[in-house]
Image (cartoon, rainbow, N blue to C red):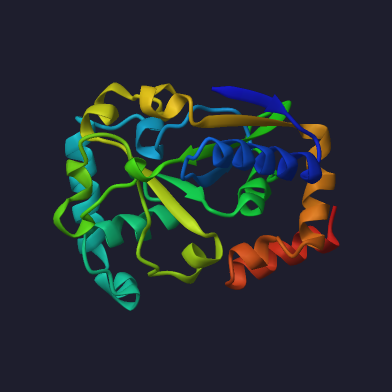
Amino acid sequence: MKEVELSTIEAYLTLIKQSKDEHSRQGYSIDFLFRGQTFDHPLLPKICRLKAKGDILQVEQTLLQEFKRTNPLLIEPHRPMDDWDYLTLGQHFTLPTRLLDWSNNALTALWFATGESLVASSYSVVWILMAQEEDFAANLETMHPFDVPQTKLVRPRIIKQRINNQSGVFSVASSQELLTKQYMNEIDSYTEKLIKVKIPSTCLKQIRTDLDTLGVNAFSIFPELEGLCTYLQWRYFE
């Protein structure tokens, strides 16, 4: 796995272009994905970063059942068709799932990396995944999310506008990987396809200002009142 430290948007975009050019010359068909984090933690779904009250797979089953049962009136407007849709919806409302968020948009991921961290950290991280066709799950119509045999990438159905605005993609872990809390960045089939970009915390404020100049901000990423209010607070307050 390659690891670099960068401090500007220009350097970040140059790294991406150089990596794409290198793989293109080698004849690879690459789909670059990006994940921004405000601090350095390994690639592990939220459900594995929490301590389950019981067997994690049973808790996961119960969690999904209760999410679907408890207040269907909140869910029906989004018209979920299957459990992929239910997990997608839950993921975007902070439900612990086996999904991990990625984006096709490099600047969206960079924006997420520049947010306020809940823990003291000297740098933020953007993960770049140089995905190939075989990394994407096929036949989602016939495969349940809990039956994926190994970590795969999925493109969710656009059941919420923010998924579209964030160019959302998910990685989905297998049940065995949940049980062992396997980091995606330590899985052999992904390790050499990852670049870990470290961004010093002293550079984050300027980068977020530059991103706003490019039209990337809380309201462009979260096109709802919540996003608008977050953007206005950032714009007018220290």
**Residue 181 pos. (x, y %):** 33, 25
**Residue 151 pos. (x, y %):** 31, 36
- Residue at x 60% of width, y 29% of height: 196
> Which quadrant of the structure image shows residue 17?
top right
Q: Nearer the viewer, residue 137 or 230?
A: 137
- Would you place residue 82 above or below residue 20 in this image? below
- Residue at x 22% of width, y 34% of height: 175
Q: Quadrant of the N terminus?
A: top right
Residue 99 in view here: no
Residue 93 in the figure: left or right of residue 141:
right
> Which quadrant of the structure image shows residue 57?
top left
Q: Nearer the viewer, residue 105 or 172?
A: 105
Residue 15 in view here: yes
> Which quadrant of the structure image shows residue 226?
bottom right
**Residue 28 pos. (x, y %):** 47, 40
**Residue 37 pos. (x, y %):** 59, 39
- Residue at x 63% of width, y 23% of height: 3
- Would you place residue 50 above or below residue 60 in this image? above
- Residue at x 41% of width, y 31% of height: 49
Count of numbered marks: 0
- Would you place residue 32 above or below residue 211 in this image? above
In this view, the residue farthest toward the left is 142
Residue 48 in the figure: left or right of residue 237:
left
Q: Nearer the viewer, residue 154 or 37?
A: 154
- Would you place residue 92 above or below residue 5 in this image? below
In this view, the residue farthest toward the bottom is 77
Residue 197 in the figure: left or right of residue 214:
left
